[in-house]
Image (spheres, grey):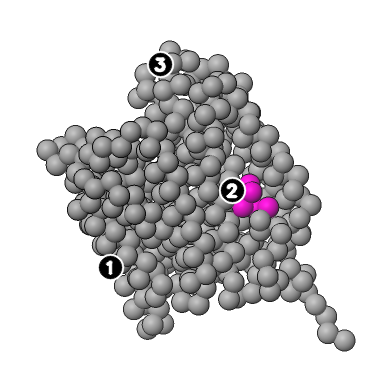
Amino acid sequence: MNTITTKEKQVKKGIPFAIWAIAFCAFGIGTTEFVLVGLLPTIANSLGISISSTGTLITLYALGVAIGGPVFTVLTGKIEHKRLLLLTIIVFIAGNATAFFAKDILMLQLSRIITGSAHGVFFGYAVTIASNMVTQDRKATAISLVFAGLMISTVIGVPLGTYIGSHFGWKITFLTIAVWGMIGLFILSFSLPNQTRATETLKLKDLPKVFRNTSVLVVLLANIFAYTGTFILFTYLSPILEKITGFSLDTINIILLIFGIGVALGNMTGGRISNRNPSKTLVYLFTFHAVMLFMITFVLMSKSLMIIALLIFGFFAYSNVPALQLLVVQLSEKKFPGSGSIASALNVSAFNIGAASGSFIGGLVMDSPLTLHATPWIGGLFVIVALLLAVINLRSNHKS
């Protein structure tokens, strides 16, 4: 009689419901990350502080993801992964509850560090768990579903959270997100099977080993450059659409929704086409990613062409997420078994570093003589660097 291991029982030919539950939780986490962009003026007025002071809430969240995520992923590596994933949701709920009860900026800053760290750990393990629950030919699809929750949050969660905060107070937004987290915790606790403990885990002192893996480092750098380029344009998309293209504020919200649809479709499609050869797929996706940024430069003054270009740009800008995530896990596990979750968390950190860098550089471009008109093609230059790194990765994988 053949014996079936716990791990083999967990692997499904289709997509298990537990992965959808993880995506549900990812939606709440994504909403928490990005909703601050729309709530900054409201929070600043409520607390009687400047918008620039309130902007530290975005920076601290990014630092929580970039630094806290990988560190806590290493420190928690010996905890059974289902229990750990549920623990990150509890911390996420606690962080949003802290924001709800906050009476000053310091308490809000603390809440952002807490939720940012939970964000990094959650995605670090969620990606590993989801990919282990499906067959080899569906791993990128499973990863894309995890990140679909994050992407869709930018389309639905952020506008809805901003609306709630504007009409009922910003604290109610955080309370709503905390309740969402409680529902996610309940669903995940029943749908996610117990996970096998990692046979090998890295310790904190071993973290530099992941960085010394040249293959992983190349992919992480590609991630940073790709999303630096993306956020140079995306951060200032609203003022570009208003001041250059000539759209009204109400129309811009609809256009951002169209952009978000492109993002969601790109993420799902990227998951499907990255299953077999993520290295090769990444080269093609970065090529189209860069091309669309350069094309946007030439259609800034055309309303109809700008809408079409942004839909396609949203598609290609985020279609590479599953390939990047799958690659960094595979390359890290190949050299250092047990390091997949840490590499995954580092990849999430790389995305956030790129987003923060892109926002900063985009601001410099906007204030320079180049003005907002230059943000698309400057972003394209950064994506070309990501493309070159993807080519290096492809050639390296062919040799190994």
- Does residue 357 appear anywhere in the picture? no
Q: Is residue 235 left or right of residue 335?
A: left
Q: Residue lying at the far front in this picture: please name it.
A: 304
Badge 2 marks a residue whose secondary structure is helix
Q: Residue 22, percent across and down?
A: 65, 53
Mark 3 or 2: the one toward you: 2
Q: Residue lying at the far right in this picture: please name it.
A: 1
Say which residue label 1 marks: 388
Q: Earlier in the sequence, mark 2 or mark 1?
A: 2
Cα separation between marks 1 and 3 = 44 Å
Cα separation between marks 2 and 1 = 31 Å
* Label 1, residues with CA under 10 Å away: few <14, some 14-19, many ≥20: some
Badge 1 marks a residue whose secondary structure is helix
Name the residue located 43 percent from the left edge and 48 percent from the top edge. Answer: 258
Badge 3 marks a residue whose secondary structure is loop
Say which residue label 2 marks: 26
Name the amino acid type tagged 1: Leu
Magenta region, residue range: 21-26
Say which residue label 3 marks: 49
Name the residue located 63 percent from the left edge and 62 percent from the top edge. Answer: 130
The answer to if 126 sits in the magenta stretch is no
Q: How many callouts does the rendering have?
A: 3
Name the amino acid type tagged 3: Ile
Name the residue located 54 percent from the left edge and 22 percent from the top edge. Answer: 167
Name the amino acid type tagged 2: Ala
Cα separation between marks 3 and 2 = 31 Å
Q: Is residue 57 left or right of residue 103?
A: left
